[in-house]
Image: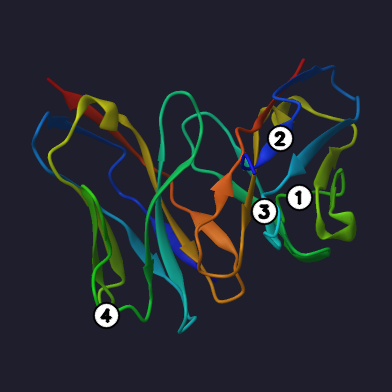
Amino acid sequence: DTGVSQNPRHKITKRGQNVTFRCDPISEHNRLYWYRQTLGQGPEFLTYFQNEAQLEKSRLLSDRFSAERPKGSFSTLEIQRTEQGDSAMYLCASSLRTNTEAFFGQGTRLTVV
Amino acid sequence: AQKITQTQPGMFVQEKEAVTLDCTYDTSDPSYGLFWYKQPSSGEMIFLIYQGSYDQQNATEGRYSLNFQKARKSANLVISASQLGDSAMYFCALMDSWGKLQFGAGTQVVVTP
């Protein structure tokens, strides 16, 4: 297994368009996390899953954001009607269980123009 | 609600010297984990070290050690014998008993020759 994979690596979109990002965690990792990171800031928690169950959503995750993890494998993060403020790096991480290290993907950099 | 604080926005350290990065946290969970990650300019998040709340010994991983003071709710990272390649952003993160991982704002470390 080569680690957490995120696609696409970069996405440029026009304001108002919808975008979807994909994360493939390390196989057998049942926890999957989504974070958003803007320049010079730490990653901000968005949501996380245990298997297919979404356990918590940050209030940062407005109604325009939705995340899924069907069958407890890969996950998708969709942003509808993108705004310029959505421009950021979107990071995905997975871990085997609680209190073990989370491994990160290389992120998807979103630019909304 | 849990909170994690890194008060040092940036630090300079000379090559071969040790540096301590501060991290304090607040949580009501009796069981939690503390993590340190390194983020070089390339952007990937690299796991460095982990400390569990019930661990009696301070964690060490090569040149990294974690100075865990539970009563003071601090988990400082010590990097010994700094190298030029240690220049990066360093993030402290707190994982609660549910597995939610929350990051501090980060400390930028610059190692000078």
Disc on res. A6? 2
Which residue is denoted by mark 3 in the rendering?
A33
Which residue is denoted by mark 4 in the rendering?
B56
Of the numbered discs 2 and 1, the one sitting upstream in the chain is 2
Judging from the image, what secondary structure is the residue with disc 4 in? loop
* Distance CA(mark 3)–CA(mark 2): 12 Å
Decide which of A22, A27 is in the foreground and name it. A27
Which residue is denoted by mark 1 in the rendering?
A61
Q: Residue at x 53, y 57 (%)?
A: B102
- The location of residue B35, given as percent across then percent down, is 41, 58
* Distance CA(mark 1)–CA(mark 3): 13 Å
Are labels 1 and 3 on one chain? yes
Q: In the rendered image, which quarter is residue B34 located in? A: bottom left
Are labels 2 and 1 on one chain? yes
Amino acid at the residue labelled 2: Gln
Amino acid at the residue labelled 1: Leu
Amino acid at the residue labelled 4: Gln
Are labels 3 and 2 on one chain? yes
Q: In the rendered image, which quarter is residue B81 located in? A: top left
Of the numbered discs 1 and 3, the one sitting upstream in the chain is 3
Judging from the image, what secondary structure is the residue with disc 1 in? loop
* Distance CA(mark 2)–CA(mark 4): 37 Å
Pointers 2 and 4 in contact (C-beta within 8 Å): no
